Amino acid sequence: MHDGHDHDLPGQANGGTAGIGHNHPAPRALQWQRAHGGKETATLTQMESDLDLVEAAFTEGFLSTSDPTSFLRLAQVPFEATADGKRLVLLRVEVDAVADVGCITPHLGGTSFRYDPLPAAMVSRRKQLRFIYFDGQGQQSLTLEEVRGLKE
């Protein structure tokens, strides 16, 4: 009995329990990692606004995996691809730890600047992920978004 009326909630028939929230079915798993729908001309960033979170999860997983080659295959990172008519082959994946410990402020006129070290609470830390491909003449450094746009 609930607010003067009696009814089965979804999932409660035959002794089951209701999902999260009143009268809502139990939640199902959703796959958000892959961009869905959208116009063909839309960029991955437009279709997937949380690409920074996907990149952070990729970096975390890649650094801890015991089999980097299989991890790259699972993540659908191409080992060989074509971009601008050039054949690209994957050489390495680089993850750099970066900490911003100071800031600069340009003075009027732009010929000089002021430098200030940051206090510990304002230091920002991040990891930068890059994929290094060889194009037959030199190396190209690509982001995860650029790699996901490559054609095999």
Image (tube, rainbow, N blue to C red):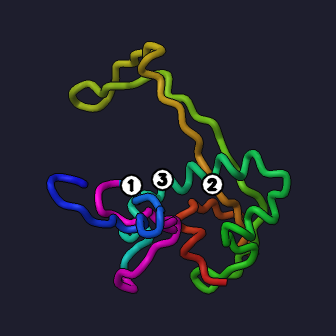
Q: Main secondary structure of the magenta part?
A: loop
- Quarter occupied by residue 147: bottom right
Q: In the rendered image, which quarter contains the C terminus?
A: bottom right
Instruction: Using the image, tell me which numbered label, if any, was put on residue 20.
Output: 1
Residue kind at label 2, given as amino acid type? Phe
**Which residue lies under the disc numbered 2?**
58
Q: CA distance from mark 2 to mark 1?
A: 30 Å
From the viewer's perspective, is the residue at label 2 or at label 1 nearer?
1
Q: Nearer the viewer, residue 47 or 130?
A: 47
Question: Where in the figure is residue 105, as x and y percent of width and height?
Answer: 32, 25
What residue would you read off at disc 3? 52
Q: Quadrant of the N terminus?
A: bottom left
Residue in view at x 65 percent, y 82 percent: 82
| Left or right: 77 as drawn, with respect to 149 | right
Which of the two discs, 3 and 2, labels the residue nearer the N terminus? 3
Identified by mark 3, the residue type is: Asp
Q: Position of residue 138 (x, y in %)?
A: 72, 66
Q: CA distance from mark 3 to mark 2?
A: 10 Å
Q: Amino acid at mark 1?
A: Ile
Front position in the image: 42 or 110: 42
The residue depicted at 70 percent of the width and 74 percent of the height is: 78
- Which residues are the magenta region? 21-41
